[in-house]
Image (tube, grey):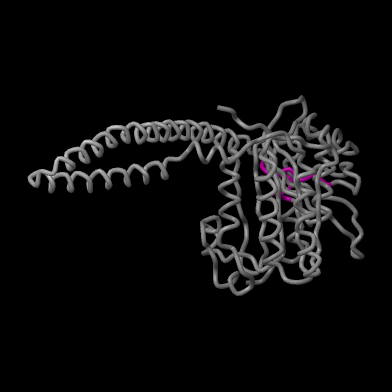
Amino acid sequence: MQRLAQSDSLAWLQHVLEHSKDYAVVLMDAHGTILDWLGAAQYVLGYTADEAVGQPCDIIFTAEDRDAGLPQAEMDTARSTGRSEDDRWHVRKGGVRFWGSGIMQPVRAVDGTLVGYCKIMRDRTDVRTQLVALQHRIDSLAAEVKGRSEFMVRLGHELRNPLSAIRAAGYTIQRIGDPAVQRPCEVLERQVTVLVRLLDDLAEATRADARVARVMPQPVVLQEAVQLAVSAIEPAIAAKGQHLSVVVPDVPISFEADPARLQQMLTNLLSNASKFTPAGGHVSISATTDESMVVVHVEDDGVGVPAEVLPHIFELFTRSSTTASTAEGLGVGLAVVKELATLHGGGIEARSGAGRGSVFTLRLPLRQKLG
């Protein structure tokens, strides 16, 4: 099939931008000043082009995100890694908030000089509302599961008491020495042993309290945690001649997490990225916040994860022929990260493909739920 001529392609693109009700396109200079206001920008953000052009891009960010330096952090991430993903509350004209999902990319001259940025975003408040409703449902189900687990733990404990009495009674009867009761007592002892073993298995499977006890949250500073993890991985990065990029907001961000477990998660992600990236490759870590979560992206341009393996990447002992031939590991570390993130009330997700590198996104709540 013959491709469109460049002039026709530009005409089509112009038509889409003029009539779009979905995608807001904002062009900015290298300092974040708005140069053009295209597509659904007025529809999504409320400002006309005349009102927006010449303003800093900060006008579409919430006051708390501006105070945290996130508009500048978004540009820093885009400049350093080639793009910056943005899913957070934004503000349209009049102060109305909406959940915006988009991406920012740097625009460079032929010689590589940065000339500005292009930000494309959509209003996905509908999706955010659905996610919040689902999260409430998940929290409710988790509370039910926790209640059942605690009941099973108590039940197992209570059942041990009568079993101990039955076993003691069996021993007493055997000591009488009557051959007629010897056989029944042996059967009784075997069955009590089976029940004790079943109770042990039940306790192991429902040890919810032990899992919760593994996480001891306290206030930590995001930037300091990232720097500690980077310091731990820098020798391995240097040994392979790799390039490491670190982008975090200038304003300190405090949140609640178990410091040791947080370091375990960040170090595992960075170590995994370095391990499966060839010598001379690139690894980056960027951190920010959205409404109620800390968001950490660890990205590499390594061998990537095949599509058939990606859905199982956080399961224990998951490896593929591609990654297994490249380096040892990829069997436990990511599963540990997922478990620890879950214990913190957060999560981890991955995007990748064979030969296309990987992006791991860790999300942890700013505040831990007590009780």
Q: Residue at 42% across / 44% down in the picture? A: 204
Q: Is residue 330 left or right of residue 296?
A: left
Depth check, front residue: 242 or 31? 242
Number of disc labels: 0
230 within the magenta span: no
Q: Is residue 43 at all visible to an observer of this figure?
A: no
Residue 9 in the image, given as x and y percentages of width and height: 73, 60
Depth check, front residue: 58 or 349? 349
Q: Residue lying furthest left in this view?
A: 180
Q: Which residues are magenta?
A: 15-27
Q: Residue at 56% across / 47% down in the picture? A: 339
Quarter of the rendering containing residue 300:
bottom right
Q: Is residue 205 at all visible to an observer of this figure?
A: yes
Q: Answer above or below: position of 232 versus 188.
A: below
Depth check, front residue: 324 or 164? 164
Quarter of the rendering containing residue 224:
top right
Q: Is residue 14 left or right of residue 154?
A: right
Q: Is residue 118 left or right of residue 331?
A: right
Quadrant into which the C terminus falls: top right
Q: Residue lying furthest bottom in this view?
A: 325
Q: Residue at 60% across / 30% down in the picture? A: 369
21 within the magenta span: yes
Residue 258 in the image, given as x and y percentages of width and height: 66, 40
Depth check, front residue: 260 or 240? 260
Residue 239 in the image, given as x and y percentages of width and height: 79, 69
Residue 111 in the image, given as x and y percentages of width and height: 92, 65
Quarter of the rendering containing residue 292:
top right
Q: Answer above or below: position of 210 versus 227.
A: above
Q: Residue at 80% across / 54% down in the picture? A: 231
Q: Answer above or below: position of 9 versus 220.
A: below
